[in-house]
Amino acid sequence: AGVFVAYLASASAFQATAPAFGVRRATVPMELEAKKSVSDLSDADLSGKKVLIRCDVNVPLDGKVITDDTRIRASIPTLEYLISKGASVAVCSHLGRPKDGPEDKFSLGPCAARMSELLGKEVKLAPDCIGEEVAAMVSSQGPGDIIMLENTRFYKE
């Protein structure tokens, strides 16, 4: 089993980071390829692959109750596609603007629960978004499993 990684960069992002890689002067093509989507993977063999996907689940909450799940609903077709192809999926996202590390009110728990309801299958919530425990959880996933990593904004990096 491998890891599928997709990265889309803009010309400005390339120009900003080029010096860090020792590129003094770079020519960027005038025409950039159209952005890729998950449907562009139709020929890819995702069975047994680990897929990390960043979803926008930054939804409004009243306490721990989601008041508008539009953003979560928008991710469901993509997740269903990946599941149908036999991928094991790790979802990462952020929620709110935590100030000093992990804050319970910014946990992605309610988002994982709502995603689980919409998909009709369990979406596990990892206790963090980094670390050995999370890596072990992702490694132990089977085809069609989904895990949501905890809020990426719990870390400033």
Image (tube, rainbow, N blue to C red):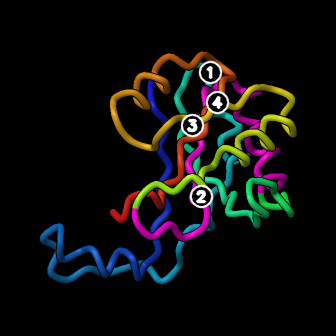
The spot of residue 72 in percent (x, y) is: 78, 53
Q: Position of residue 25 (x, y in %)?
A: 20, 83
SS at badge 3: strand
Task: Left or right? Give the position of 76 relative to 36.
Answer: right
The residue at which mark 3 appears reads as 90
Q: Which segment is the magenta one?
A: 72-100
Q: Which residue is mark 1?
A: 47
Q: Is residue 118 above or below residue 57?
A: above
Point 73% across, 47% down: residue? 110
Name the residue tied to disc 2: 106
Q: CA distance from mark 1 to mark 4?
A: 20 Å
- Within 10 Å of disc 1 (Cα), the crowding (few <14, some 14-19, many 20+) is some
Q: What is the distance, in whole Å, between disc 3 and disc 2 at their CAs?
A: 19 Å
Residue at x 37%, y 79% (from the top left corner):
28
Which of label 3 and label 2 is nearer to you? 2
Q: Is residue 128 left or right of residue 22?
A: right
Q: Earlier in the sequence, mark 3 or mark 2?
A: 3
Element marked by disc 4: strand
The verdict on residue 124 being magenta is no
In the rendered structure, does residue 86 fall within the stretch colored magenta?
Answer: yes
Residue under circle 4? 124
Quarter of the picture holding the C terminus:
bottom left
- Name the mark nearer the viewer: 4 or 2: 2
